[in-house]
Image: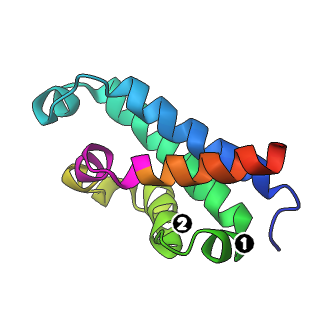
């Protein structure tokens, strides 16, 4: 069952993206992989994004069909249950691409429009 508070979930996703950007500001790939604390913090925020996406259920693909919601939720499952086989390059590519920026921007627009 989808959440009755989708605006809050979109806010949670945008906020988690912002945290990832703050944690990795001025980072390149080498610095990211040398900093286990930052890797852990980024993975925690990705878990938040995945959980909020799961709580949104079918609301998310209906509101924002341009995003890969099954993959977003799936990453959370992999981080929780297959943490020992997560490819760090996959995480780095995700955070260094525009994917999270677009997700943040789109979720922020929905949150702000719902908030008035």
Spot occupied by residue 93 in the image (x, y as percentages of width and height) = 23, 52
Q: Residue at x 72, y 65 (%)?
A: 56
Disc tally is 2
Q: Establish if 74 lies above or below 17.
A: below
Q: CA distance from mark 1 to mark 2?
A: 13 Å
Badge 2 marks a residue whose secondary structure is: helix
> What is the number of the mark on residue 14?
none
Q: Nearer the viewer, residue 10 or 48?
A: 10
Q: Establish if 5 lies above or below 1.
A: above
The reply, left or right, for residue 3 in relation to residue 46 is right
Q: Which residues are magenta?
A: 91-101
Label 2 crowd (10 A; few <14 / some 14-19 / many >=20)? many
Label 1 crowd (10 A; few <14 / some 14-19 / many >=20)? some
Residue under numbered circle 2: 73
Spot occupied by residue 31 in the image (x, y as percentages of width and height) = 16, 26
Q: Main secondary structure of the magenta part?
A: helix
The image quadrant that residue 54 belongs to is: bottom right
Q: Establish if 50 lies above or below 25.
A: below
> What is the number of the mark on residue 59?
1
The reply, left or right, for residue 26 in relation to residue 107 is left
């Amino acid at each position: 069952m989808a959440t009755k508070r989708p605006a809050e979930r979109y806010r949670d996703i945008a906020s988690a993206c912002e945290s990832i950007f703050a944690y990795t500001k001025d980072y390149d790939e080498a610095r990211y992989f040398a900093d286990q604390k930052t890797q852990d913090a980024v993975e925690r925020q990705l878990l938040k994004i995945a959980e909020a996406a799961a709580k949104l259920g079918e609301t998310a693909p209906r509101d924002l069909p341009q995003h890969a919601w099954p993959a977003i939720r799936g990453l959370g499952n992999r981080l929780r249950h297959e943490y020992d086989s997560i490819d760090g390059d996959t995480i780095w590519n995700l955070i260094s691409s525009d994917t999270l920026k677009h997700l943040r921007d789109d979720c922020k627009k929905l949150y702000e429009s719902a908030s008035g």
